[in-house]
Image: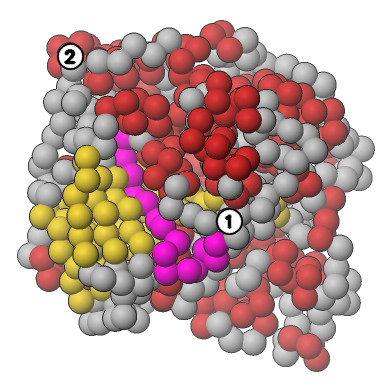
Amino acid sequence: MNGYHGKLLEVHLGTQSIEEKPLAEEFLKKYIGGATLGAALIYSRIKKGMDPLDPESPMVFATGPFTGSPIPMVSRYAVCGISPQTGYWGEATSGGTFPFRLKGSGYDAIIITGKSKEPVYLKIDNEKAKILSATHLWGMDSYETQNTIKKDSDDPKMGVACIGTAGEKILRYSCIMNDEGRAAGRSGMGALMGSKNLKAVAVQGKIKPELSNKKKVRELVKEAAANIKKNVSALVLRENGTLFYMDMGLTLGDTPVKYFTKSCFDASKVNAKALKSNYTVKTFACQGCLIGCGHKIEDFKPDIKTVDGPEYETVGAFGPLCLNSDMDSIILAHHLCNTHGIDTISAGVSIAYAMYLFDIGVLNYENCGMDIKWGDSATIIKLLKMIIDQKGIGELLSSGTLAMARKFGRDEGEAAQVKGLEMPMHEGRAFHGEAISIATGPRGACHLKGDYYNVDFGEIVPEYDLKPGDRFVSKGKGAAAAKYQSLRELFDSLTLCKFAPYSVALISQILKNITGWDFSAEDLLAAGDRSMCIKRAVSNKMGLTQEKDCLPDICSKALDEGATAGIEPDMDIMLQEYYTYRGWNFDTGWPFREKLEELGLDEVAADLYNG
């Protein structure tokens, strides 16, 4: 089999058993890899209404056919399961060198079930898998854990994905860390890992699948590299990382301010220029990447020499969203999240909501033991530490905005989340195609499956008739956003970095010459549609209905300032268009049985409708 090992590793932590199983080529051709392969493996192993923290709740680590190949920007992996944060489908992806190590270990995916009686970690080295004690690792932060496992293995190049103390405490939006400060950040996959007493997955190996056409792949490497070198976004990312977007986002009204109630903020103290002017910043890249958008800050504090990042989402969440312009506190918040393994977006949004609630009198000194005022950088750090330590008001904030709204009897439209996952640092009011993408994202509010703004910025996808339009127009955006969403699904299947500037035609050629499979543009779109539908079916099985496909009022009602003043996305018209394209039932929120069968998901259709 080309591009794959054709093997799955099944690990049951309760019985301490490990079993190698084959993955058929037809199965892989249908689901490709990454998060989509994870969804296919998970669907048949879950029961309706299953508690995400049930010991038998499965989680999957998976790569795709592109991972480990010579193609640039393919060092990505996905980790999937039922989200402890939302109760629905959950997934997160990350880069670095870990994905290459995972692929090189000899397996396309690892599925983990059960709960160990004692803390353990999974170690795989060239197809040899062991479950080892992690009692000495329990209580360590993510950096300590990675370094200790590498020392224990006497292998500084060992790939390690682990949880910090937040995952151990099953904090609902804890994440999984790898390659020091790289994070599989969203959906609470760290909590799922912690619930199994699994501290880490350590991988190493040099097993490479064959390529269908090595000579042609080498030619495609050159073509891909040429595309990257001439791409304007790639150049900007190399220079400034994702933080380059801060100025643009605030100008366009796409960066939320003051907990989504404002859009104007002075970017000069929290933009890329401020970062590079005031700190010693060095760039780094994931393995095989020609861009290098990652940043490290050196000599940050006497007691904190090096800090990974921060990136745009983190700066937005702890900065403008909290009316905070103190970059020192933003960098420290980011470091604390990385150290303990916490999603910076959910943490920042939850803290901003606490500031909002204090401002309107719902929270006060008496019921939270402190003042929580806008822009108070010391309070942001204090609240974050309380979240990490699960103390005082921090314990509630660690449950996210939806739980906070319910606790205080607030309207759920005030909670900045979709399906329980906090909103990213983007505004549906600024790009209406983005609004419907975020509202319908497979894991909830997600900027990586809701980035239709790329099209409105100028990206053209002729194969799917996607081209720039008026960003404030809702009509016609539903179906277009669905197509683009399906295209982005492919990136997390193959696996491929979202910043890779590759056309549909180039992706098709790469897939063909790695695997030998002929996928037309229509076949690729169908694969993306299939991915969306099987993930949707997982969430439907967990109780998801159409009512959850919406933006909260706090993130959709018109503002009175900035570039989006007086503008609201028409969610109703876009949702109708979106559902029509997807073949989903508007009354139930389920994919129609006929649509599932059309996409080759016959077993899912039978289970969902007859189970």
Looking at the picture, tell me which residue is in the foreground, 590 or 404: 590
Instruction: Report which residue position mark 1 lands on.
Output: 48
- Identify which residue is drawn at 46% across, 15% down: 523
Residue 26 showing in the rendered view: yes
Looking at the picture, tell me which residue is in the foreground, 348 or 544: 544
- Identify which residue is drawn at 16% across, 47% down: 105
Splitting the image into 4 quarters, where does residue 512 fall? Answer: top left
Instruction: Report which residue position mark 2 lands on.
Output: 213
Residue 374 showing in the rendered view: no
Tell me how many marks there are. 2
At label 2, counting other C-alpha atoms closer than 10 Å, the crowd grade (few under 14, some 14-19, many 20 or more) is some
At label 1, counting other C-alpha atoms closer than 10 Å, the crowd grade (few under 14, some 14-19, many 20 or more) is few
Q: Is residue 472 above or below residue 254?
A: above
Splitting the image into 4 quarters, where does residue 202 fall? Answer: bottom left
Q: Position of residue 119 (x, y in %)?
A: 29, 77
Q: Is residue 601 left or right of residue 430?
A: left
Q: Is residue 49 left or right of residue 52?
A: right
Q: Write down the region rendered in magenta.
A: 50-67
